[in-house]
Image (cartoon, grey):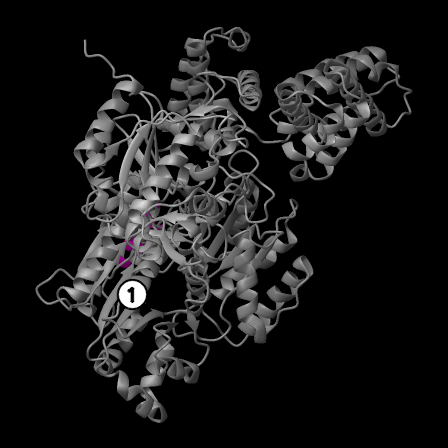
Amino acid sequence: MAKVASEYEVESIFIEKLGEMGYDFIPMSNYNDIVNNFRTQLCKVNAENLMEAKGTAELTDAEFARVLLRLENHTIYESAKILREQWVLDLDNGKTVYLSFLTDDETRNTYQVTHQVTMDKSHKDDVLYKSRYDVTILINGLPLVQVELKRPGVEINEAINQINRYRRFSFRGLFRYIQVFVVSNSTQTKYFANMNERTEDGATDQSILKSLVFYWTDEENKRINRLIDFTQDFLTKFNVTELLTRYFVIKQSEPVLMVMRPYQIYAVKKAMERIFGSNMNGYVFHTTGSGKTLTSYKLAALLRDDRRIDKVFFLIDRKDLDDQTVDEYNSFEYGCVDNTDSTATLVRALGDSSKTLVVTTIQKMAAALRNPKYEEKMAPLRDKRCVFIIDECHRSQFGKMHSSIQGHFQAANYIGFTGTPIFAENRSADGRTTADIFNAGKLDSCIHRYMIKEAIADGNVLRFSVEYMRTINVLHVATPGIDPTQLDDPEYCKRHNIDISDAYHDDQRITGVAEDILTHLERHTHPAGKDVYTAIFATDKIQTLMRYYRYMKTHNPKGYKIAAIFTYRPNEDMDEGANEYSGDELKECMKDYGDMFGTNYDLDTLDAYRKDIAKRMKQKELPQIDLLLVVDMFLTGFDSKATNTLILDKTLVWHNLLQAYSRTNRVSKLTKQFGQVVTYRNIKKAQDEALRLYSGDGNPNDYLLESYDYYVAEYRKWTEKVQAVAETPDDAGYLQSENDIRAFILAFRQLSKTLNTLKTFSKFNWDDLDVFMDEATFSDYKSWYLSYYDDIERKRRQGSVTTLADIDFNIELIRTDKINVVYILNLLKDINRNDKAAMEKSIDLILREIERSDNEKLRYKSDIMKDFITARFFDLDPNADIFEAYSEYEHERLQSAVEEFAQVHGIEPEIVSEILHKYFCDEKSVTKESIRQRLSSLKLGLLKLTKLINDILFFVSDMYDKFTAEGV
């Protein structure tokens, strides 16, 4: 039998392959070795400048100390910017020299590989726990690529979790310069960018998101999975240097690092080849939601910085796309966009040679060309080397205006970006396709393809869950030859010249659909855990929208925040059925919106109204909108990770259908497993045709979730796997070996994921599952799952070593937070304390609720709550305030814990209380150094002082988790 390679064997083969590729292996054991080697390599890469400035390619101790002062003690985000700067070093001889830390010339850089470097407090004092890293790739002596390996068969996510642990506890000093991580179990390999330690506001530690971990592929999107194959392509000196210097983005609006995905890199390269190699046009077909804005930005930025190009234009069609794209561009590089707000401003920008990148609308550019008064200023651009990058280039507006723009800019190239090109099957009224507009002669007009089938397989967009709700039910028709069961099929009705529009707009149907939406909305927008999402409801015209809106507004017992938006006059891009009353109806919606959110919009501020709605739908402004009613607006170009549901009472076809569906399938939090579509019209044939067209004739079912019955069968399968490890919930609590615990965790995790999927179906009913595992039994198993999670988390925080430390619990899918501290106290409050028998029965049920709770804070303080109930609650006066009594009990327990800690460690309780109070007020203010200063009067030895500081930090953190909870 073939032997499974160990991590060490995989590591040896990997390092050997890097050696064959020109990397120098250098043995290192600790952080001192890293620093000393960096000093040597820095001098090598800057040898020419150093020789010229001081006559020797070496740095004195004082000079190198100044280098380290520049490099160390910065955030990961700041370190990434420093890495790419040319820094001026003051030399001891009074001169200065420019130093480069990373160059784009792989013949100048030095490339090394080492392994098993240990980081500990004895070599870097801000390391919290000792760690040893697998393989480190150093460029010019700096650790820029870190590789973590697992043996075959181990989940790759465990390597990601391990990296998150290192980021939190031991990546310090020069290891903050890591730009890219690679994780592999030999048969599956991924890469991803490093992430800043904390969120922009500094309040929360950040972990690497699994959604930002990518596969590597070839130009045809064929995945390169195996570690050695990946290494031979991704980690060549040229490719890794190009990745770090050309295809890595440091956002300027927020502390975010981004590494481009393979299809984005290939698209940019091929577009550059099309422009400079063949001087032709073309378009990039990357499916909606796959990151076209980043791709187009990187192309525009590289072209802007190329001296062969005089001006780069980014053309956008619709106003509702304008702000979003400009905001994204400016987030990548602040101020890079000259967002012209008028045709005159645009013309001035065209004449300014310093403004080499201009973002504007197609309409403004066409207007500038039409207006005779701008003819003189536009003339000099006629023969300039310009590049036009066209966003959403499938839109008809660009086709109509293309000729006039192309006629003037005769030396220009045109590169389009679209997720839904116009093909022969869905060509526009003028008969042209996207390939016709971006004609490339004998070359393929499509520069690069990345279709929905690849994006879903790679995890870059989500699959769709589509529920078809039949609302037209006819039992009998008088006309011979008409099948009443097919009257909801638009194609059937068209063939037989049947108009059933009145049936779709019948009052009874409108009421029924509205009630069905309101009944099941929470199931769709709150699919699992604590996360809540937003939904869009699209109708066929404004009049229908208003009927739904008015009904929902007055029949909304759950208090959903419902809004509506539409155009109130005929629009060149949309046919929403606007009439003379539409303005009044929109004002009605705006007034309700103002009452709901405290705003004051009117018809003159429609654009501001639209922007506010967009922010609330994206949850960038709170409270959020729960349900947004539209006709056409927000169905294209609106990019919202927080939106997970599209409800349709209208017919859509081809690119309009896929664009609308794609509002729901942006990758977001773990609880968003797929994009949900609920349609009250029969559009299955149109849906299948659109998915087939835009996936290269793929099977439409590959992009859709399976049926409800399929997931019921999956629930049964995973129930059996859970019970094979632990036959009953009680057995789950007696698992001894880490292998058995791991098997239970993996099986129950998948069972939970399947249950969460089932719950999103409108027809979900626990009765369908009870024969396999009922809700109460599931909850009991879940208690043990959470118990193992709590135990492993506790060991992680203490720095204990366990093979389960990096297992992926997907805890976001499990926790609902419904049973929290306030919930339990309210249950206690409602107990009849004058009836002892009933009281004891209720207490037993409440103690079980505490055990089954998945609320994080309640689980931290479950022991305190149980002790309060068993030791204090029975003796309370029946009229006592439960909340006040519990608060007093908590205070007593906290004081007792402080005194006990102080007693064990031989220090005054006042010292512990002081540090604890400070931590409760501002945890960031309590550092090892601040504790060291507070303990300085104790005159402790170094080892004892260090241990005491660590113990205090763990204690105050533990107390913070136990004694701070929502609502208490």
Inspect the magenta stretch and tell me whether residue 604 lies in it. Answer: no
**Is residue 278 visible to us here?**
yes
* Residue at 61% from the left image edge and 43% from the top image edge: 203
Q: Quadrant of residue 889?
A: top right
918 horizontally vs 734: left or right:
right
Inspect the magenta stretch and tell me whether residue 490 lies in it. Answer: yes
Give the amino acid at mark 1: Cys
Residue placed most toward the observer, 215 or 917: 917
Residue 335, image x, y percentages: 45, 67
**Residue occupied by mark 1:** 393
- Vertical placement of residue 874 versus 365, above or below: above
The quarter of the rendered structure image containing the C terminus is: top right
Q: Quadrant of residue 591?
A: bottom right
- Vertical placement of residue 842 versus 737, above or below: below
Residue 52, image x, y percentages: 31, 57
546 horizontally vs 145: left or right:
right
Predominant secondary structure, magenta span? helix
**Is residue 685 visible to us here?**
no
Residue placed most toward the observer, 313 or 931: 931
The region drawn magenta spans: 485-494
Residue placed most toward the observer, 591 or 202: 202
* Residue at 52% from the left image edge and 57% from the top image edge: 629
Looking at the rendered structure, the number of numbered marks drawn on it comes to 1
Element type at mark 1: loop
Residue placed most toward the observer, 962 or 195: 195
Residue 820, image x, y percentages: 68, 29
* Residue at 73% from the left image edge and 25% from the top image edge: 824
Q: Residues within 10 Å of mark 1 (few under 14, many from 20)?
A: many
The quarter of the rendered structure image containing the N terminus is: top left
Residue 274, image x, y percentages: 17, 63
733 horizontally vs 135: left or right:
right
Q: Residue furthest left?
A: 442
